[in-house]
Amino acid sequence: MLGLTPQSLHSKPLHSNNNKKPSSRPHHLQFTMTPFLVVFTILLCLRTPASSAVTDTILPGQALGVDNKLVSSNGGYALGFFQTGHTANWYLGIWFNTVPKFTSAWVANRDKPIRNTTSLELTISHDGNLVIVNWSTKSMIWSTQVNIKRNITTAATLLSSGNLILTDSSNSSEVLWQSFDHPTDTFFPGAKLGWDKVTGLERHFVSWKNLVDPATGAYCEQLDPSGVDQLLLVALNSSIPYWSTGVWNGKYFAALPEMSARHSISAKFVDNDKEKYLTYNLVAEYMDPNMVTRHVIDVSGQAKTFIWMKGSEDWVMINAQPRAQCEVHAICGPFTICTDNKVPHCNCMEGFTITSPKDWELENRADGCSRNTQLDCISNISKTHTTDKFYSVPCVKLPQNAPKVEAAASMSECAQICLSNFSCTAYSFGNSRCSMWHNELLNIRQLQCSDTTNSNGGTLYLRLSAKDVQSLKNNRRGIVTGVVIGTGISALGLFALILLLMVWRNKNKRSGQIQNESEVCDGITAFRYNDLQRATHFFTDKLGGGSFGSVFKGFIKGSNAIAVKRLDGAYQGEKQFRTEVSSIGAVQHINLVKLVGFCCEGSKRLLVYEYMSNRSLDVHLFGSNSMLNWTARYQIGLGVARGLAYLHDSCRDRVIHCDIKPENILLDASLLPKIADFGMAKLLGRDYSRVLTTIRGTTGYLAPEWLTGVPITPKVDVFSYGMVLLEIISGRRNSCPSCPNGGNTDVYFPVHAAHKLLAGDVGTLVDHKLHGIANLDEVEIACKVACWCLQDDELDRPTMGQVVQILEGLVEITMPPIPRLLQAMAGSSHSTCSFFVSGKRAALRV
């Protein structure tokens, strides 16, 4: 920790008037905080300037000005004054010091912005508290407000964890105050979310008001106040929880099972006599040293996790809860409709306009939308009747908790009762039930019309002024009239159009045009080609490519990185596009790359996936600039097995990947493996096998049955998985000459591995970059699994579900024989590797 010399932290003196001395400051300040701070009357009389050198500590008599900052000892965080957006407001806060894009993580005076920074300082007052003082207005803006004994001298330090602490300078272990106890919107590693049962202190996270205003916002992440061991996301203005983590089971939250697979994060839930809280830390051995993580409750009401990789242009979101934006309570405000698969998500209901367009641009939609025309009952209170009408809003999720009106036996009666109550703004009638809503309408969510059969879906009848209803009807009538006229004109050229249509259809069969687009696009965002061009900077940042097309990195609104696959070949493009868009959107698993959107314009076919920041497995296995430790490798092998098991056994339609290889295994920020390109495979029904008409896959990973013409089953993926597992163990291509530790360099590595396994010498198979640091029991299990997966007869290979159980340690595995194919490659047969054990075919016993 660096000390401070008696020179100013300011790049220029506090006062430009050299004749004005510190002692001439007024002895009394105008206080803007609580009365007990009156003791601050002799503040800073002995204040000395501090060093301009970078430091992490402020001592008594030193001050931090607007132009300077404290920096934690590891350089990860900084503390200082900052502005947000293009506003004139200033704040004291902590931010990520190594990230080029300014990103605040904590704000001291979030609800009390500073306008005048002429004489602004952060310093330690005579009573030991850390304070923000504005000498130009003679006021104290903010204070730590701690009762400190008179004989204690304090110091403020910014720790490497991002925690700002106030301590006894003679005993730094005695923390008098810390920013971790007063969080804003960001959950730092090592911080606590929960309660101190002794002091009553509650730690929770509250979103910003909007994108540029850190004031207290609308959403909160907190521990369940009812005592259940879970976290809640709550709308502050209503105290309504709209999402929960599920109950903590000792290892992870019930609704977040993926926590068990993220070894880069170590979470702990504590409940004792003194405290109840959740905390987490980052596990260094699983973290990329060039990566910065950030967990925040943002203005969208979602709890999001972001990462920043060195050289990135922006934060990359890797997780958001709840996953659907429209599940956030009142996210769009009153009298709006939220649509998940549409950008923007929020739109005004018919007859309404945005109340505050400026706030909407900053993602603060609390005011929602306002009526174009006031209701008759509001503008004419004296009337005993109303001219208001109802306008139907079909295919929406209805607001919950609507009172049932028993007296209404029909829709007309239900409508009449609503009209007779001036506070009634909408009603719905279905299954002989009349429901109505009063005052503001919240949480209206657009559904696919096929989804309205559930109990919360249906048609809402919105109360509008007669003028607005008539205007909307006229608009509809105009559309209908235009359609009729257009149809009539089109009929005059019917024969010519039929001829052109036939030519057009024949042409598009060759160019890959997709018909019946609505059948395959439900639930997946449709992007315009121009938008994807801009998002990818005109396809300049290429991530990779294969037989189906090239993949490019891009960014969309909301700071989300995406991977855009541009399909090559018109005929092939159509085939793969139809398969992927119709199936992948419904196939979701933690170990599968998620398809988030597509583009279909003319002959252009593009697929939009979630971006994987750690690229593909081959980069880490075979590249010289990256190294995976053994634990990470074993977990990657297990994760890939889980993903394949899901494709083979848990999908509605069984999916055979047909091209498992390291290039198709992507890694997220925490090295969680996700299988890519599974949508390129054919879909096979559960009850039959099909012979694929063309050989798929990549040389070196192909199962023997691809060459024999026998029916293709999921066991081709099992074979490919075995090949990949050997490469995970060795860190080298199977197709390259092996025996790095000596021997015949022409031996095919899988053959070499099988012999070493039988000889009990699996340690020599492990990637030499690990320098022998590996769990040899796990290495042996992985080698056995790989060799069983490579058996010639698919009946001898395990299922991927069995592989998962073996790698999880739930069942034991026997020693496998060397497959005949590998023996042939080796050019010899070994008696110890016979296919027959005790007169019977060797079999996998699980």
Image: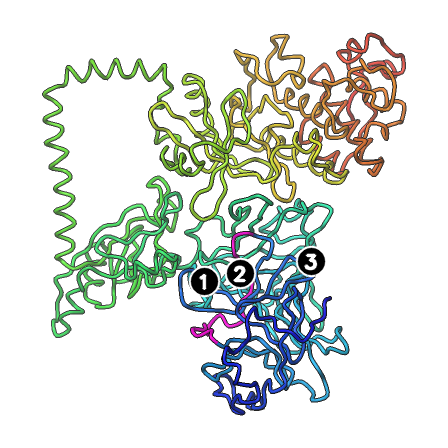
As shown in the figure, which amino acid type bears the numbered disc 3?
Asn
In this rendering, which labeled residue sits more in front, label 2 or label 3? 3
- Secondary structure of residue under mark 2: strand
- Report if the CB atoms under discs 1 and 2 are less than 8 Å apart: yes
Q: In which quarter of the image is the C terminus?
A: top right
As shown in the figure, which amino acid type bears the numbered disc 2?
Ser
- Secondary structure of residue under mark 3: loop
Q: Distance between the residues labelled 1 and 2?
A: 9 Å
Q: Distance between the residues labelled 2 and 3?
A: 18 Å
Which residues lie in the magenta part? 100-118
Please state the horizontal and vertical placement of residue 790, each as a whole percent of the image. Answer: 73, 19
Identify which residue, 562 or 416, lies in the foreground: 562
Q: In this view, does 586 lie above or below 605?
A: below
To which residue does mark 1 refer? 84
As shown in the figure, which amino acid type bears the numbered disc 1?
Thr
To which residue does mark 3 refer? 74
Counting residues from the start of the chain, the first of labels 1 and 2 encountered is: 1
**Left of 239 or right of it: where is 616?**
right
Please state the horizontal and vertical placement of residue 303, each as a whole percent of the image. Answer: 52, 55
Please state the horizontal and vertical placement of residue 485, each as a whole percent of the image. Answer: 10, 31
Q: Quadrant of residue 295?
A: bottom right
Q: Which mark is residue 104?
A: 2
